[in-house]
Image (spheres, helix red, strand yellow):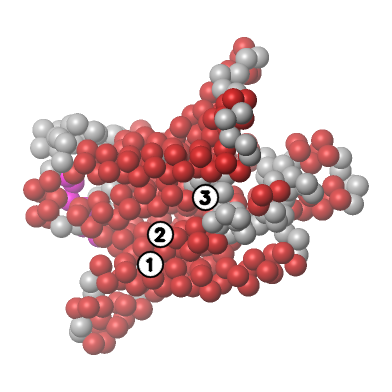
Amino acid sequence: MLLEFLFQRTGMYLFFSRLVSTGAATILSFVLASVLFPPYIRFLRRLHFSSELNGEAQQHQPVMPAGILFLFIITPVVLLTARMNGYVISALIIYVFFSVIGAVDDIAKVANKRRLAKGQITKEEYQYKADGISASLRLTLYILISFGVAFIAYKYIPNINGHITIPFVSTQRALPYMPFWLFIPFMALTIAIMANGVNFTDGFDTLAAVPLITCAVFVGVVSYISQNAVWSSYLLIPHIPGVEELVPFVGAVIGTLLAFLWFNSPPSSIIMGDSGSVGLGGLVGIMFIFLKAGFYLPIVGFIFMAEFVSDILQIGSFKLTKKRIFRCAPIHHHFQFGMRSKARYPSEFQIVSKITWRFHIISIILLVAGLILFLKVR
């Protein structure tokens, strides 16, 4: 809104350009996060704001959620650099509400730890309450909020109309359409699944950050191209006027995550926490829906989908057969246990680093594959 105000007052096209506003959002969010993270970390350390028990997770003690600070950086940066329209407002609603749910969960974990220290609950009860808010309540909140936003977006944003793109299918031949009664649940479930998928992935330091950046880059590139009638016609992708306002939003997310990676480099000072992973996961989900690219999430966001599916399969298999499909779920723990059993690496730190970097590389390769598939392979 600030850049829009400057454009109206000065008439300088520089302030109107989406590339300029995106660059400003990226740099501003990175600088703000870089300045605010050190005092934020010191503040949480003084409060002993950690959900881990003494002696646990030694390589990243104390464990504190960065996502709460994400919320207070990304939101104002978006308000300053993006022009408000239905896409930006809907995405902000999902991001803010999901981040708040995650923050409540983070705080509940710390409260339960302190209750354990005072002897008010046993260690077994603490482990049972380790998620802070029950999984069923969180999932209910995700779906209710997602349904509400999906319904309003479908009603008031012209280009949210049930049309979707499918890999390898040309939009000139067919642009598949979902009726209202099917599209709204599809949209809501996509948002909820991504929120959970990113949350499950945030098990190792930085594991969720790079896949989030690659998903954000995909959204930024496709948003910028889709708003241009000539480019979208040439590339045979849907023309979506107004969706370019998501690009500064993407810049704010990327800048904040880059600063997070700076402070989360080994030895890490802070983790993302549910306040970060849930909010950003829901945000990625709704942005892919806005681009009519929901069916590309299993490609670009494969890491998140694999983490979510592995956890669901593990729970379902154990409940039905009392047998586990994976050594441990989500799937990054499956690989962790496998490497640990083979004793190929002398320390747990090396095992975690190896898995994390390989997941990062996969996410970058899948970003390239997703862009090629969406923009050229029809």
Q: Is mark 3 on a helix, strand or loop?
A: loop
Q: How many marks?
A: 3
What amino acid type is highlighted by mark number 1?
A: Thr
* Residue range corresponding to the magenta coloring: 237-242
Residue at image point 53% right, 23% down = 313
In the rendered image, which residue does mark 2 sit on?
254
**Residue 239 magenta-drawn?**
yes
Question: Are the two marked residues, 1 and 3, in contact with CB atoms closer than 8 angstroms?
Answer: no
Establish if 198 lies above or below 178. Answer: below
Q: How far apart are marks 1 and 2 (CA)?
A: 6 Å
Q: Pointer 3: residues within 10 angstroms few (<14), some, or many (20+)?
A: many
Establish if 86 lies above or below 365. Answer: below
Question: Are the two marked residues, 1 and 2, in contact with CB atoms closer than 8 angstroms?
Answer: yes
What amino acid type is highlighted by mark number 2?
A: Ile
Among the two numbered marks 3 and 2 on one chain, the one whose residue lies closer to the N terminus: 3
Snapshot quadrant of residue 368: top left
> Looking at the picture, how far across and down is residue 312, in whole percent?
54, 27
Is any atom of residue 66 visible in this view? yes
Q: What element carries label 1?
A: helix
> Looking at the picture, how far across and down is residue 134, in whole percent?
67, 40
Establish if 94 lies above or below 41. Answer: above
Left-right relation of 165 to 246: left
In the rendered image, which residue does mark 1 sit on?
26
> Looking at the picture, how far across and down is residue 141, in whole percent?
57, 45
Q: What element carries label 2?
A: helix
Closer to the camera, 135 or 159?
135
Q: Which residue lies furthest to the top in this view?
A: 321
Residue at image point 19% right, 54% down = 225
Among the two numbered marks 1 and 3 on one chain, the one whose residue lies closer to the N terminus: 1
**Residue 206, numbered label:** 3
Among the two numbered marks 1 and 2 on one chain, the one whose residue lies closer to the N terminus: 1
Question: Are the two marked residues, 3 and 2, in contact with CB atoms closer than 8 angstroms?
Answer: no
